[in-house]
Amino acid sequence: MLDKNGIAKRIAKEIKDGYYVNLGIGIPTLVANYIPETMDVVLQSENGLLGMGPFPFEGEEDPDVINAGKQTITMLPGSSIFDSAMSFGMIRARKVNLTILGAMEVSENGDIANWKIPGKMVKGMGGAMDLVASAENIIVAMQQVNKAGESKLLPKCTLPLTGVHCVKKIVTELGVFDVLPQGGFKLLERAPGVTVEEIIKATAGELIIEGEVPEIVV
């Protein structure tokens, strides 16, 4: 199976030259470490930064330079800092080509739940609300099963929704899936050493498998 860094490496392959990309909290932040230096990609952080770089080495952190998850980050040459109003203006105007988010659940028709577990204290939905409403291309980075071994790829989300019909692709520790327009998770690739049968058992929603499924190359 893939670890969190493996998931991030695989998602980094979805990024194209010239893209503006927003990275959500959690596994998505790791994607910044795996974008090729030869590729011209601008990472946008919703707290007001264009030109986010990889995480700093230990001892080189600047507490004033953080991402939306309050992690210390680096800034690349040519980066710019601005207020959150301008940042969300970019997001709502669909200036961001790709959004990469974490999730607690995704449904077979592309709904996403990633902000609240009932009974637990949270400050609010935050920027995820704007991202899922505005982004044209959303890739989710997540664990496919919870600690109890239950699938988080579901026929219908059980947790409060962040957005509906918005997720296009999912990368988990077990594989890569497209969310089809008509509904269903289409298995594109499987993690090294993981069998199709294991993925079937870990997927509660409709799973579409066509022909031989290749292994993920990261």
Image (tube, rainbow, N blue to C red):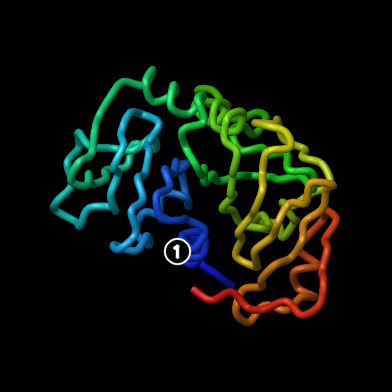
The percent coordinates of residue 46 (x first, y second) are: 40, 31
The percent coordinates of residue 218 (x first, y second) are: 49, 73
Residue lying farthest to the left in this orientation: 59
Residue of label 1: 5
Residue at the spot 60% in from the left edge and 30% down from the top edge: 120
In the rendered view, does 67 fall on the left or right side of 218? left
Which of 38/51 is in front?
38
Q: Amino acid at mark 1?
A: Asn
Which of 62/8 is in front?
8
The percent coordinates of residue 62 (x first, y second) are: 17, 41
In the rendered view, does 114 fall on the left or right side of 157? left
In this rendering, the answer to whether 133 lies above or below 179 is above
Residue at the spot 28% in from the left edge and 37% down from the top edge: 66
Which of 26/90 is in front?
90
Residue at the spot 70% in from the left edge and 67% down from the top edge: 188
The percent coordinates of residue 81 (x first, y second) are: 25, 29
The quadrant of the rendering that contains the N terminus is bottom right
In the rendered image, which quarter is residue 30 located in?
bottom left
Residue at the spot 60% in from the left edge and 38% down from the top edge: 136
Q: Residues within 10 Å of mark 1 (few under 14, many from 20)?
A: some
Q: Secondary structure at mark 1?
A: helix
